[in-house]
Image: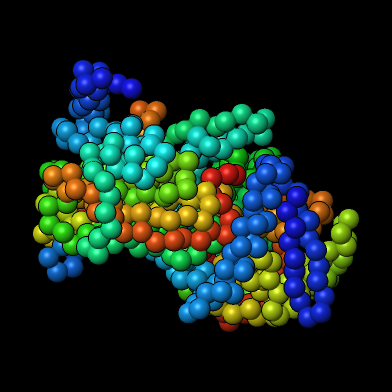
Amino acid sequence: MADPMRIRAQASGDKATVRVLMSHEMESGQRRDAAGKLVPAWHITEVTAALNGKQVLAAEWGPAVSKNPFLQFAIKGAKAGDKVAVSWKDNKGDSRTDEVTVS
Amino acid sequence: MQNRRETLKQSAVVAGLLASAGFPQFAHAAFNKAAFDAKSVQDAVKAAGGGAIAESKDVTITGPDIAENGAVVPLGVSTSLAGAKQLLILVEKNPSVLVALFHVSDAVEANFSTRAKLGQSSDVYAVAIMADGKALFAKKEVKVTLGGCGG
Amino acid sequence: MLVWRVKSKGLTLLLFEQNKEVTMQRSRLLFWMAAAALSCASALAQKTASQGIDEYRAMLQDGNPAELFEAKGEGLWTQKRGPKNATLEKCDLGKGPGVVKGVFVELPRFFADTGRVQDLESRLLTCMETLQGFNAAEIAKTGFGKGEQNNVTALATWIASESKDMRFNLSQSHPQEKTFYEVGKRLFFQRGGPHDFACASCHGEDGKRIRLQDLPNLTKNPGDGVGFAAWPAYRVSNGQMWGMQQRLNDCYRQQRFPYPGFGSDATIALGVYLGVNSKGSASIAPAIKR
């Protein structure tokens, strides 16, 4: 199971801003190792987010997203106390879900 | 090149995998391989269902003018247009041109930020694809002092 | 081969870095990109390259991947591990067993139980050995980025974060602390290696830089969040979390010196010299760096 994400969700006015840090190599597939061989691509392909169990976001990522990726978005109408869950899935089939309460 | 039947079969398989992995059934979330394999901004947009790209003041790309290291370049994409279905971030000179593709729903603002790897100084594009396939873009140049794809 | 030019008053040092992972093609490309970036920088009407880079760094402050390592370190502190299956909660980092807040800005310091001046990372090894039963010497030899070293780095990152924005206040009351300051100073100015470099070659004067990287003068207080006050840091160029031990190790590599031992007296002495010079400045660790 992959390392946990750091998620911060802050309500302000009529929305909640969500900032996520994910722990992932995001290997581009362009890099060569010390022996000169291409290191195969290994990266998050899909990211989703849910507010109180209902999906609000779906995104697809390629290998050009940076290592230990950062994501910021805003959920309309979310308020303090709501639950925000973020999930990711990578091209090796690994996945991770973490949840926070909006502050 | 996949024919339609194979594409449908693959989507069904992916949707099945997502369901078994505990992912909610969200038709759009299947990974658009063709778009991510595209070698140009227009090709990636086309693979995502967009038409010819046209510049628009209603789409915004945010990012630094100069990035100290191409490995981590903060980029943001947003649009004030209602009805945008997808927001794309693309780096013209990257081997992987399409960086990220966001499906816009009514529940989120059409405003997303992430960090991308830039192999070299390049124009960076934000593209909004509307429901009718119209593709609108904004671009800016990001200079990179050290390329970010290597070690 | 990458050529770095260190400019200082009238004296130009050429630093050659041979990086095995960089092919000739890339280094040529890098050279021209650097040249292009520098010439573009001078052509930028409204903004200097330095300002551009400051803006870039500001954009990265929110969402520092170091937080991922902080979280890991925090978990390790209370996790029962090692042959003795114990936590680190009784570890004395200078302010009493289990006290973590404020210790980072007082390290390195003298510890009576070991009879030596220790920095954060060597002190963590002491605690991991005495409390948890790990072999400190083995961990020291492991090499950065591998095995238990990753845990030491995560712990150091979290402990540093617990002193964020606090001001450095290293003790110089114990005779050994004073000795280590003088030893660190001596090491700082000692020229050696095939290029006859010293730490001072890059960090001994105001106004030096390598390409677009400003080099702080570490012979005096370089100000809040600079130099000693900025490590541990997350390096975006390789996506790695570096503690002060690894930062010093890499400085030695860049000077083509032999590598110092992990947690060795030499590295601790340098830490004392840098830390005492930084007295009063605020720590921003864990920081984010290129």
Q: Nearer the viewer, residue B53 or C199?
A: B53
Q: Nearer the viewer, residue C157 or A77?
A: A77
- Figure quadrant of the N terminus of chain A: top left
Position of residue C220 in the picture relative to residue C240 (left or right): right
Q: Quadrant of residue C224?
A: bottom right
Q: Nearer the viewer, residue B42 or B14?
A: B42
Vertical position of residue B132 compared to residue C213: above or below: above
Vertical position of residue A89 compared to residue B118: above or below: above
Q: Residue at x 50, y 78 (%)?
A: C45
Rendering colour mode = rainbow
Residue C106 visible to an observer of this rendering = no
Position of residue A76 in the picture relative to residue C38 (left or right): left
Position of residue C241 in the picture relative to residue A6 (left or right): right
Residue C286, position as x, y percentages in the image = 51, 62
Q: Residue at x 25, y 64 (%)?
A: B57
Q: Residue at x 33, y 31 (%)?
A: B33
Q: Quadrant of residue C265?
A: bottom right
Q: Nearer the viewer, residue C176 or A24?
A: A24
* Number of marks: 0
Residue C32 visible to an observer of this rendering = yes
Q: Residue at x 39, y 42 (%)?
A: B40
- Figure quadrant of the C terminus of chain A: bottom left
Residue C19, position as x, y percentages in the image = 72, 47
Residue A3, position as x, y percentages in the image = 40, 41
Residue A73, position as x, y percentages in the image = 25, 56
